């Protein structure tokens, strides 16, 4: 396929966009590997890896646990969203719209009021610690994950799966051999969105208690407002790196799939 | 015994009756056409037959046995709908092999059947392509091929010529007709085209506003038309040609006798 070459304004816009993304990263890199940069100095000071040493010695485990925790939150949210979206699709339009509004409420309500209310309920139920944080993260991730899953279904329907069942397949073969490969990209997008929501939660963890063991953002936030730029940059860089790694895995598509050109579930 | 029998079938959605006591038979090894204007309930009838939606009343029998309580996958009624629904992540070969794998046919049986189907449908060189790489006509043929690979007792075709230009339409119609006669397939084909109905159908049913107004063998339709004003109006003047083809006044031809 011949690609149309970009016009000058398009190129400039792209350059501007790339610069807006890359410039902060350059500064992060510089401050991560050079401890100091004097006000009147043209070049940064001597290189150092002390920030990285601190990170790996002190908080690497937490960063990994936090990533794993957010991955689990996102997976659980996706698992809940799939049958919910399927059920919603089968309802009449008016009922569907009403239920959709309810499902999107967590997006609209301020996290402060939700967290305060839920915290009270959790305490009454004796639900504290990581379990409570897990549920609350799911609560905030659900509307985003659900809306992405549902938009896939609403756009493309379930006809391929129905066709598979009409051809003789039971539910699970139809789901795993037909539905899942077709909607995989949509699910991956929804999964990544869920991950991001959980991974970047700060207030909820802060409010529910000091769940530092499963939340990297809790460690990162005070460092950013602190005075040690080297440490703050290293931690921010690692935070970005872990998130980018998950994005990379979510973007991975089998070579075979790239040939097909006809799947359409990506959102 | 008819392969497929529909008895007093009703279906309502949102308080509106879409199908009203529809009855018709689809004889074994014959091509029956269900004809009617858009919104008559033709596609809904097919969806009820496959089990995709449950009727609010009536019965569907396959070889004399009610299948209403039989799950979709076991009914033996396979639908090729307007959008062919080929699986986009599978090649044509994988698509066609899908129902065979489900039925646990051996690899050798699958290969043999795939080869024979590909040859019959003239799609040998397209078997390893993805649906997105096929033309509209090829996609439709591939979808029919996949449906036949499931060895259904009745094949349902929903507007199979939709979106095709005239030469392709004629070509696929002729192919379908010869395929049906050669393999004695039991087919229920839905169309809004009177021409297709009279060219293909051994039996023709007319569905209007969810009601079956007339369902007869093709040769008997014209003699009963005057008693059903809706159908008479829908068809308009009909001309018959000696070769057995039918033409209607809204697509006027030079020769032929005006029947109605």
Image: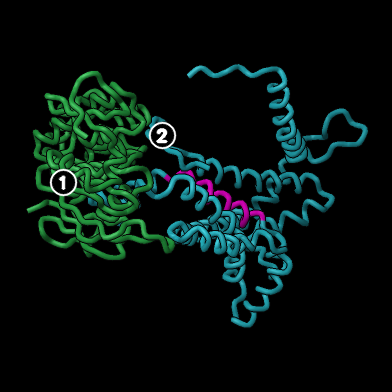
Q: Chain of mark 2?
A: A
State which quadrant residue B57 falls in. bottom left
Q: Position of residue B54 (x, y in %)?
A: 31, 61
Which residue is located at x 14 percent, y 56 percent? Answer: B62
Tell me, yes or no, whether the highlighted magenta stretch contains residue A191.
yes
Report the disc number at residue B216: 1
Picture colour for chain B: green
Horizontal arrangement in the rendering, residue A83 relative to residue B63 (left or right): right
Q: Is residue B131 above or below residue A202?
A: above
Residue B222's place in the image compared with B125, above or below, is: below
Q: Nearer the viewer, residue B85 or A131?
A: B85
Which label is found at residue A171? none
Q: Which residue is mark 2?
A: A262
Q: Nearer the viewer, mark 1 or mark 2?
A: 1
Judged left or right of residue A221, residue B52 is left
Q: Residues within 10 Å of mark 1 (few under 14, many from 20)?
A: some
Q: In the displayed structure, would residue B70 be above or below residue B114?
A: below
> Residue A222's x, y, as percent?
78, 57
Taking the spot 55% from the left edge, 59% from the top edge, the residue there is: A97
Residue A244 location in percent, x, y? Answer: 60, 43
Q: Nearer the viewer, residue A226 or A2?
A: A2
Q: How many numbered marks does the figure carry?
A: 2
Which residues, given as a range, are shown in magenta?
A: A183-200
Chain under disc 1: B
Q: Are marks 1 and 2 on the same chain?
A: no
Q: Residues within 10 Å of mark 2 (few under 14, many from 20)?
A: some
């Amino acid at each position: 396929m011949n690609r149309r070459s970009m016009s000058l304004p398009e190129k400039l816009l792209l350059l501007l966009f790339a610069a807006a993304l890359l410039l902060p990263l350059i500064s992060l890199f510089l401050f991560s590997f050079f401890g100091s940069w004097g006000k009147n100095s043209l070049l940064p000071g001597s290189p150092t890896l002390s920030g990285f040493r601190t990170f790996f010695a002190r908080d690497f485990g937490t960063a990994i646990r936090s990533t794993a925790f957010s991955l689990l939150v996102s997976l659980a949210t996706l698992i809940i969203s799939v049958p919910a979206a399927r059920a919603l699709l089968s309802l009449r339009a008016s009922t569907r719209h009403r239920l959709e509004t309810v499902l999107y409420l967590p997006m609209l309500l301020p996290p402060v009021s939700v967290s305060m209310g839920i915290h009270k309920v959790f305490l009454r139920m004796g639900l504290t610690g990581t379990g409570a944080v897990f549920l609350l993260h799911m609560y905030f991730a659900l509307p985003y994950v659900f809306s992405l899953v549902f938009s896939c279904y609403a756009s493309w329907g379930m006809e391929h799966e129905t066709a598979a069942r009409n051809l003789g397949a039971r539910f699970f073969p139809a789901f795993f051999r037909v539905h899942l490969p077709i909607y995989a990209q949509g699910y991956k997008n929804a999964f990544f969105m869920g991950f991001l929501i959980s991974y970047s939660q700060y207030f909820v963890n802060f409010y529910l208690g000091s769940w530092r063991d499963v939340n990297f953002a809790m460690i990162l936030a005070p460092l950013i407002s602190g005075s040690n730029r080297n440490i703050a940059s290293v931690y921010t860089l690692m935070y970005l790196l872990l998130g980018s790694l998950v994005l990379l895995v979510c973007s991975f598509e089998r070579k075979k799939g790239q040939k097909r050109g006809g799947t359409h579930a990506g959102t | 015994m008819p392969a497929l029998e529909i008895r007093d079938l009703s279906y309502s959605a949102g308080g509106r009756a879409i199908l009203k006591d529809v009855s018709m038979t689809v004889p074994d090894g014959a091509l029956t056409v269900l004809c009617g204007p858009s919104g008559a309930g033709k596609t809904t009838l097919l969806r009820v037959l496959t089990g995709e939606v449950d009727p609010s009343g009536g019965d569907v029998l396959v070889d004399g046995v009610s299948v209403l309580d039989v799950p979709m996958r076991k009914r033996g009624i396979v639908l090729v709908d307007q959008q062919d629904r080929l699986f986009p992540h599978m090649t044509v070969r994988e698509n066609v092999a899908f129902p065979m794998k489900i039925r646990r046919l051996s690899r050798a049986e699958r290969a043999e059947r795939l080869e024979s189907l590909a040859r019959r449908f003239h799609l040998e060189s397209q078997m390893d392509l993805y649906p997105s790489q096929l033309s509209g006509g090829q996609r439709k043929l591939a979808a029919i091929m996949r449906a036949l690979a499931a060895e259904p007792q009745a094949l349902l075709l929903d507007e199979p010529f939709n979106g095709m230009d005239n030469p392709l339409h004629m070509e696929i119609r002729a192919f379908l007709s010869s395929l049906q006669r050669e393999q004695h397939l039991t087919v229920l084909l839905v169309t809004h085209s009177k021409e297709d109905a009279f060219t293909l159908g051994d039996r023709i049913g007319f569905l209007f506003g969810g009601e079956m107004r007339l369902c007869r063998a093709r040769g008997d339709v014209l003699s009963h038309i005057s008693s059903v004003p809706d159908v008479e109006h829908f068809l308009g003047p009909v001309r018959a040609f000696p070769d057995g083809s039918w033409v209607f006044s809204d697509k006027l031809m030079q020769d032929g006798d005006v029947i109605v």
